Amino acid sequence: MASGMQHKNAISTATEGLIQAQLELYHHSLGYVKSVVLRAATELGIPDTIHRHGGLATLSDIATQTGIHQSKYSHLRRLMHALTVTGICSVEGYDDDARYKLTLVSSILVEGGESMCNLSPMVPLLVELLKLTMLFDIKEWFTDERASAMTLFEVTHGCTPSKMKAKKGACGIFQAAMVADTNLVMEVVLKEHMDIFKGVSSLVDAGGALGAAAAAIAKALPHVKCTVLDLPHVIVGAPTSHDVQYVAGDVFEYVPPADAILLKWILCIWRDEDAVKVLRRCKEAIPAGGKVIIFDGVVDSGASQNVILKETQVLFDIMMMGIDGVERDEQQWKKMFVEAGFGDYKFTPVGHRSIIEVYP
């Protein structure tokens, strides 16, 4: 009898393993649904609606404020259920008594929230059809010899991302997303890591676009002369400012001299040899006691137990792979710094990215 029970338990354990494997497989396969649900909620303005209702809104409140047609009311309930299960929102009560609340995640998707950082422009940039269809062509890109000299994005869409943005008039969407990201990053940096600007009296934000980072630094540190360097078609759309100077140019050719050069989230879009070229231009621009300040990803080497951090970093790397960019680990960064002629560096993790200070 005991032998039979042991056999039954062994079968049950094996069966449980299969069922768990199936569950995990389906969960991974449906990951894109979580992304599009988040985009739908952002486009509908659901987080904003909850915020405007004092942080607690009924299904009826959300339907009325977002303009959802009455015939879709039951479907809205299902969307809200997905948002609460995945942690984008939370809920009190059940069924008709349900009251939806913001979580830490959805609180940074509202205008005028406590943090004053609204990351909603980033969602349609990260969750877009162009990127999704690009990723569907990974197999062809890996195996088709005709694609050997092309990026994954080019294989799918027949042009570079910059040309596609110009074609679709999406440059404004991209810039709005970058400004939103910069506002949050700079709020954290200027509160918690102000020491990185110690001894800096002049700074060039190379590839700084509309100058959100430079403007934040100039406001917090009025004694620092801030300059933004970017391509002419970007600079032409920059705001008028008395605190920030804008210079049209190419970071591959020349970087204006300053005590510090800032490179925020741009080295990841280039392969190593191009990133090294930019770093060399930056080294030429700083004095002996100067430095380059980089805000970019440093892929975790395995020490962290934060699964969300690790997954976010490797998923960004796959996204960057599509445009010939790369998310780097510490050893890859170190190799580039050596090639560019730098002598020392320091990493300070901040979320899924790091502040990297590089010295001659």
Image (cartoon, rainbow, N blue to C red):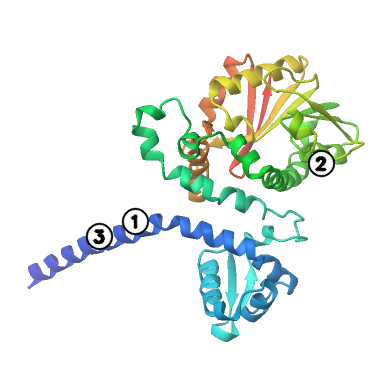
Residue 225: percent from the left, percent from the top? 87, 29
Crowd band around label 3 with a 10 angstrom C-alpha radius: few (<14), some (14–19), many (20+):
few
Above or below — where is 282 with respect to 350? Answer: above
Dot 2: within a 10 Å radius of its alpha carbon, few (fewer than 14), some, or many (20 or more) residues?
some
Q: Residue furthest right?
A: 242
Q: Do residues under tags 3 and 2 come within 8 Å of each other at their CB atoms?
A: no
Residue 255 is situated, as x and y percent measured from the top left of the image, at: 75, 20
Answer with mark 1 or mark 2, whichever residue precedes in sequence. Answer: 1
Q: Which residue is mark 2?
A: 216
Label 3 vs 2, first from the N-terminus: 3
Quadrant containing the C terminus in the rendered view: top right
In the picture of the structure, the residue carrying the numbered disc 1 is: 25
Tell me the SS state at disc 3: helix
Place of residue 331 in the rendered image (x, y in percent of width and height, measured from the top left):
51, 26
Query: How far is disc 3 from disc 2 in space, using C-alphas?
Result: 53 Å
Q: Amino acid at mark 1?
A: Leu
Q: Residue at x 67, y 71 (%)?
A: 66
The mark tally for this picture is 3
Local SS, label 2:
helix
Q: Nearer the viewer, residue 195 or 217?
A: 217
Q: Which residue is mark 3?
A: 18
Comparing 342 with 153, the one in front is: 153
Secondary structure under the numbered disc 1 in the rendered image: helix
